[in-house]
Image (spheres, helix red, strand yellow):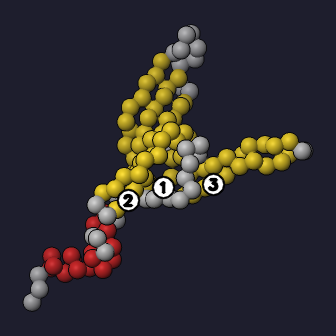
């Protein structure tokens, strides 16, 4: 008779090959990645946002700042890192929409963890109170 832990390990190997079933819930937040597309309106080019991908992600707030700039209206700048599965065609000029906020993608880095790859998107979000 086999014990339960060896059965779970065999199932995980079948599902993900490298135990991917263990990290099934890592990406818990739905995000939308949008890109700029150029369309023609009355003979002139117009930039519009269109959906590039809807993916699951994990995120971490990594800092920010706020305050008035030379007597101007107060502003807030936030930094956030999103972790997603690899996605082909992703570019820095795209934007992440999450929880009603818009984030500019500043940097994309590929991270290898064992045999698994993931992308880290370092983003900046700006908001006015």
**Label ID, residue 119:** none
The residue at the point 27 percent across, 75 percent down is 12
N-term-proximal mark, 3 vs 2: 3
Report helix, strand or loop for mark 1: strand
Please say if 21 is above or below 121. Answer: below
Query: Is label 1 or label 3 in front?
Result: 3
Question: Would you say residue 20 is visible in this rendering?
Answer: yes
Q: Nearer the viewer, mark 3 or mark 2?
A: 2
Q: Which mark is residue 117?
A: 2
Q: Which residue is mark 1?
A: 30
> Residue 118's image quarter?
bottom left
- Position in image of residue 93 (x %, y %): 59, 43
Q: Residue at x 86, y 42 (%)?
A: 44
Contact, mark 1 vs mark 3 (Cβ under 8 Å): no
Q: Position of residue 49 (x, y in %)?
A: 67, 47
Q: Earlier in the sequence, mark 1 or mark 2?
A: 1
In the picture provided, is 105 more to the left or to the right than 13?
right
Classify mark 2: helix, strand or loop. strand
Q: Residue furthest right?
A: 42
Mark carried by residue 51: 3
């Amino acid at each position: 008779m086999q014990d339960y832990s060896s059965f779970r390990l065999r199932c995980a190997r079948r599902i993900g090959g490298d135990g991917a079933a263990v990290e099934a819930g890592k990406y818990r937040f739905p995000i939308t990645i949008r890109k700029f597309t150029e369309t023609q309106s009355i003979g002139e080019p117009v930039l519009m946002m269109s959906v590039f991908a809807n993916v699951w992600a994990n995120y971490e707030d990594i800092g920010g700042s706020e305050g008035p700039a030379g007597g101007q209206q107060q502003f807030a700048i936030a930094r956030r890192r999103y972790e997603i599965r690899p996605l082909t065609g992703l570019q820095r000029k795209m934007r992440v929409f999450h929880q009603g906020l818009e984030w500019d993608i500043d940097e994309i880095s590929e991270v290898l963890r064992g045999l698994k790859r993931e992308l880290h998107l370092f983003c900046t979000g700006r908001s006015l109170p």
